[in-house]
Image (spheres, grey):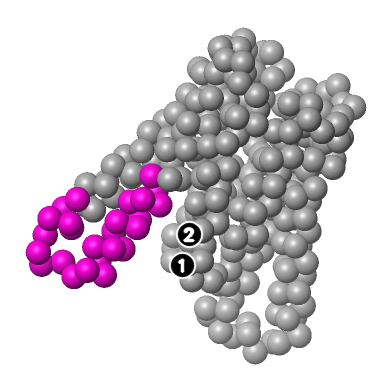
Amino acid sequence: KFLIYSCLLLFSVLLSLRLDGVIQWNYWAVFTPIWLWKLLVIIGASVGTGVWAHNPQYRAEGETCVEFKAMLIAVGLHVLLLMFEVLVCDRVERGNYFWLLVFMPLFFVSPVSVAACVWGFRHDRSLELEVLCSVNILQFIFIALRLDRIINWPWLVVCVPLWILMSFLCLVVLYYIIWSVLFLRSIDIIAEQRRTHITMAISWMTIVVPLLTFEILLVHKLDGHNSLSYVCVFVPLWLSLLTLMATTFGQKGGNHC
């Protein structure tokens, strides 16, 4: 996860500089951190598949079999995301085809992610990327239609599915804040539990609030309601990504691509 957030942070920095005209790289170069991320995922999956193929005894172990299937699901979704990213670069650099075609891999990702989430729930697996993709299908459709000018809604309206998702995340933040306050006022709770809940509340706040700020600034920028540079717009996103990178140090390892 640390690698993923690092690649996303570097990509967002390069993208903001490119959009502001500070650097004149083509978008294939701007997407270099994304290509690195996907390359490492494919290399890791290849190594995992090789180990699985050369050790037949692993196939008799239930937990190992579940791990292998989870890896295949994650790699399949990453390949579809890679197809989308390649199409985005080609469309921006030299293409003149519809954005709906560009977003087609994401339209496949969403139903596959729903099935993956059901499978993950049955096998007690954490599939965070799959959840993110499955709940954003409507947002993907709206963005593609807006870019093709099939609909001419303001971006504030186009992002309504995103606002619904962010409202849910804000409720999660509020939940953690309330529980942290209750734990602080309780004399029956040990200090370690208090620190854990306070840390969770602060982490969620420093992830969700800057992320929401970034999305609001970006929407207003796209609608022409502010003259901020893209670097200024992206600053809150960088804060969220840095917080996510920090939280990875306290998490257990797992089979995540």
Q: Is residue 120 visible?
A: no
Residue 247: image tag: 2
Classify 10 Å Cα crowding around label 1: few (below 14), some (14-19), many (20 and above). few
**Residue at screen point 57% across, 36% down:** 235
Secondary structure mostly seen in magenta is helix
Quarter of the image that includes the N terminus: bottom right
Tell me which segment is drawn in magenta: 181-205
Residue 192: say if magenta.
yes
Residue 63: say if magenta.
no
Q: Outermost residue toward the right?
A: 94
- Residue 116 placed where, x, y %? 55, 55
Q: In this rendering, would 108 be left or right of 94?
A: left
- Residue 230 placed where, x, y %? 65, 27
The residue beneath circle 1 is: 250
Q: Image height check: is 182 above or below 20?
A: below
Q: Secondary structure under badge 2? A: helix
- Relative to the observer, which residue lies in front, 208 or 141? 208
Does the CB distance between marks 1 and 2 fall below 8 Å?
yes
**Picture quadrant of residue 92:** top right
